């Protein structure tokens, strides 16, 4: 009788100890290298969430060498192996097809222009992401992507002579770009360096920071000076996982994630500029586009999107809306920097 009473008292004491009853471990996949700014931001988020929840919510990070590229990570989320993902944005169309419009190069080329359009469209995409079974924690611009190539590229015709790496979510997208004259080679980010070494790829879009750290530029020593594309920092959880987090922590967790995203952008821009300087010291050639080049590139982009929309109605609404907001911004800012 005495032993049973002791056991009962022990069980009750464990149940009433704060923080000992419930612990949620969230497995998040990320293609970012741990030492990169994105990898470090995710590590910091894990520490902050643990602190906010007093140890009840913890993050376990599974990097690209374990889970693969962003397409692999998204697949593992659907399977239930991972509870979330932190990616640069190329994985987003897997869970919300319309967001591919943010991957269109040379369409939004300044931060102010981007932020105006992005903020207008974000509620639409947040709703779609939730309908598809996910919770968007944070999603923001985290840097700019440049075009690296084996030979100098100034106009679309120059790029058409290169085998271009493109990481997309749909064969229809690949075909649309082929139809306007580009030699598309679908390539996952984890396979890029091997594709370059083997001559399968001769041009690619990548952050200067990633190009420097991975030494990719040594095989493609030319870079266009224009901000050709955007890089995002996205963190999503499965809706099921989000619902398991105690409600009293959620607001502060989201606010923390969004602040980290803002800080990340400022850090990455500084590091990108430093990376370009370092690559120039190692014989990178930065090619300045002629004054009439941007107009020609944007005409090629529109031609590609017209063909793509004919094949994929999911993108039409998003693209038309983006162009509506982009036109609105440009009319309000006729003397914007180009």
Image (spheres, rainbow, N blue to C red):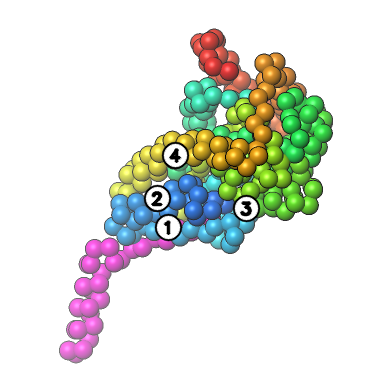
Answer yes or no: is residue 232 visible: no
Residue in the image at 67% along x and 34% along y = 285
- Does the stretch in magenta take in 142? no
Residue in the image at 67% along x and 16% along y = 291
Mark 3: which secondary structure? loop
- Nearer the observer: mark 2 or 4; the answer is 4
Q: Can you say whether 305 is above or below 83 in the image?
A: above
In primary-sequence order, the first of circles 1 and 3 is 1
Mark 4: which secondary structure? helix
Q: Which mark is residue 69?
A: 3
The alpha-carbon separation of the residues under discs 3 and 2 comes to 21 Å
Q: The N terminus appears in which quarter of the rendering?
A: bottom left
Residue in the image at 54% along x and 46% along y = 87
Q: The C terminus appears in which quarter of the rendering?
A: top right
Identify residue for label 4: 267
- Mark 2 crowd level (few <14, some 14–19, many ≥20, 10 Å Cα): some
Mark 1: which secondary structure? strand
Identify residue for label 1: 59
In primary-sequence order, the first of circles 1 and 2 is 2
């Amino acid at each position: 009788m005495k032993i049973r009473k002791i056991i009962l008292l022990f069980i009750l004491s464990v149940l009433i100890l704060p923080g000992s009853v419930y612990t949620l471990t969230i497995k998040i996949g990320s293609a970012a290298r741990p030492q990169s700014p994105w990898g470090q931001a995710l590590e910091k988020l894990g520490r902050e969430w643990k602190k906010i929840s007093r140890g009840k919510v913890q993050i376990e990070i599974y990097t690209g060498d374990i889970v693969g590229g962003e397409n692999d990570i998204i697949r593992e989320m659907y399977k239930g192996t991972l509870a979330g993902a932190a990616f640069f944005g190329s994985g987003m169309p897997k869970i919300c097809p319309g967001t591919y419009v943010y991957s269109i190069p040379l369409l939004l080329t300044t931060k102010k222009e981007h932020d105006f359009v992005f903020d207008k469209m974000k509620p639409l995409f947040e709703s779609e992401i939730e309908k598809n079974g996910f919770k968007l924690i944070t999603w923001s611009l985290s840097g700019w992507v440049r075009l690296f190539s084996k030979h100098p590229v100034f106009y679309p015709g120059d790029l058409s002579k290169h085998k271009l790496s493109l990481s997309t979510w749909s064969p229809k997208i690949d075909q649309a770009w082929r139809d306007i004259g580009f030699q598309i080679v679908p390539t996952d980010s984890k396979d890029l360096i091997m594709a370059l070494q083997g001559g399968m790829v001769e041009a690619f879009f990548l952050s200067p920071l990633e190009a420097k750290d991975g030494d990719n530029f040594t095989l493609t020593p030319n870079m266009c000076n224009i901000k050709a594309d955007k890089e995002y920092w996205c963190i999503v959880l499965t809706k099921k996982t989000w619902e398991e987090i105690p409600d009293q922590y959620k607001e502060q967790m989201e606010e923390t994630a969004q602040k980290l995203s803002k800080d990340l952008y400022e850090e990455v821009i500084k590091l990108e500029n430093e990376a370009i300087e370092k690559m120039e010291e190692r014989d990178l050639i930065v090619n300045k586009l002629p004054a009439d080049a941007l107009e020609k590139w944007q005409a090629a982009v529109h031609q590609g999107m017209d063909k793509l929309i004919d094949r994929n109605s999911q993108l039409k609404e998003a693209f038309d809306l983006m162009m509506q907001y982009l036109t609105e911004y440009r009319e309000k800012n006729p003397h914007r920097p180009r």
